[in-house]
Image (tube, rainbow, N blue to C red):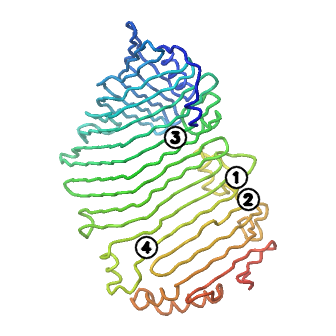
Amino acid sequence: MTTALTAPMAMADVTAEDVWNNLVTAGDLYGEQFSGSIAKNGNITQVSDLNASVVLPDGTFKISLGGMSMTERGDGTVLLQFDASSDVEIEGDMTSIGESFKLSGKMNVSGLDAVASGEPGNLTYTYAVPNANVTLTDFKLEFDGLSEEDVNADVTVSIDMTEFNSVYQIDTTAGLTSSGNANYGGVSIDVDAEIVEGGEAGTMSFNIDIADLLGTFDFTLPNKAAAPDLPSLIEAGLDMVYTLTMGASNTSMSVDAPDEQFAFNSTSTGGKLDSVVNTKTLSYGFESTGTNMALSGSDIPFPEVTAGIGRMALGLTMPSGVLAEDGDVGLEIALEDVTIADFLWGLFDPTGKLPRDPATVAVELSGKGKLLVDIYDPQALETMAFGGMPAELANIDIDRLEVRAAGAEATGSGGFTFDNTDLATFPGMPRPEGSASIRMTGVNGLMDNLVALGLLPKDQVLGARMMMGIFARPGEGPDTLETELEVTADGAVMANGQSLR
């Protein structure tokens, strides 16, 4: 992608009309409609009453953004500038639920200028901005069944960007192709609201500061989309890869209402978001590292609750639609190196009998499978709720299974295939075949400690140990248990070579 953005391309004089046509054509292919009143005076073209509208299955939405100017600079490039101050309106008519709303306010923009270059139909937009700000004020929300007298909110949103550098390309000569990157030295978002409801006033504030953001994307849409919603874009051939990495961040939120007070603060050393969307696959991933949190409030019976998470991750991969062939499936859920405040430990372990090492819960699965219903069709999902399989798995691998807390640890791995034509061997589910290995350490010691603390009855421990004796065998090292679970082709279930079924 970097090569594509930096490689020499044929340069031509770009006009304001070329820029406007590029943006309008890209929006049209994406399923959005741009409109505005255009007036040209010399080398400056002013677009006023700039509107963007979309028609979605759930209703129609329209955004009014004021205006912008396009200045032809005499060197074959065009300077784009948003109006310094403009009125903003967002209107929605949600036909699916018979409701409508209108959100209005003012937008002030400073420093957020771009330069367009290239050739007609294939333009590159470049930002090199030391400092920029977008402020939204004077919000007013009108919603069916809810009048301004019922709820009155005074909301201000401020977005500050430092060292913002971005280059992205929009090519509309054959469908829509776009790629680029955006690099921010820092981004700060502040939201302040004063809300009056039922004659009582309260305040809410939210702030997030993020350092060193870098976003990259590749986007291809060979055909015009009927609407900018995911099913329509996939039907039009969408192929998109997006990645956002970030450095240290700080997030805070507070609420001060007549009957409630609440405060939250979180810091993180870094994070990542990524997604892949195309006609075969949907994949989303989130990761955050070095997170520390503090929570307090009138409904919390402690001065402050603190916790830390060394790494948390959530990932999902699945087919993007009902396809003939099996597609990639995957799942990751991870909470690693979790710590809580000592006083919380002390509530159930005042003598410090349990090891207070950081805890971890992590699962990673991968395999192949297919969807059997259209997940974008509400009626299909409703029908599925009354029976039927929404999907089928061809195989699944347990790439990681780890649970570690209070001095005990369990790890595992394995893999299974599934015969989806055989729902009789294991009634109601496809017949599995494969094996999984599990290793546990410190489990007996943990149960002894829980009994000593009065958190676990002795008779339950006896039953648990009897079950472990059936499923597990002693491993190398003290307080170590191992088990090999196997499901054979004829439906037999084995544990360490002993038949369980």
Residue holding disc 1: 370
Which numbered disc flags the more N-terminal residue, 1 or 4? Answer: 4
Q: CA distance from mark 2 to mark 4?
A: 36 Å
Q: Which mark is residue 394?
A: 2
Q: CA distance from mark 3 to mark 4?
A: 34 Å
Look at discs 2 and 3 and give the one toward the viewer. Answer: 3
Residue 56 placement, left or right of 80:
right
Residue occupying the point 75% across, 65% down: 423
Q: CA distance from mark 1 to mark 4?
A: 38 Å
Q: As drawn, which residue projects farthest toward the front? A: 8
Label 3, secondary structure: give it: strand
Q: Position of residue 483 (x, y in %)?
A: 66, 81
Label 2, secondary structure: give it: strand
Residue 373 placement, left or right of 455:
right
Label 1, secondary structure: give it: strand
Residue holding disc 3: 216
Type of the residue with mark 4: Pro
Compared with 290, 301 (above or below) is below
Q: Which mark is residue 358?
A: 4
Which numbered disc flags the more N-terminal residue, 3 or 1? Answer: 3
Q: Position of residue 244 (x, y in %)?
A: 48, 45
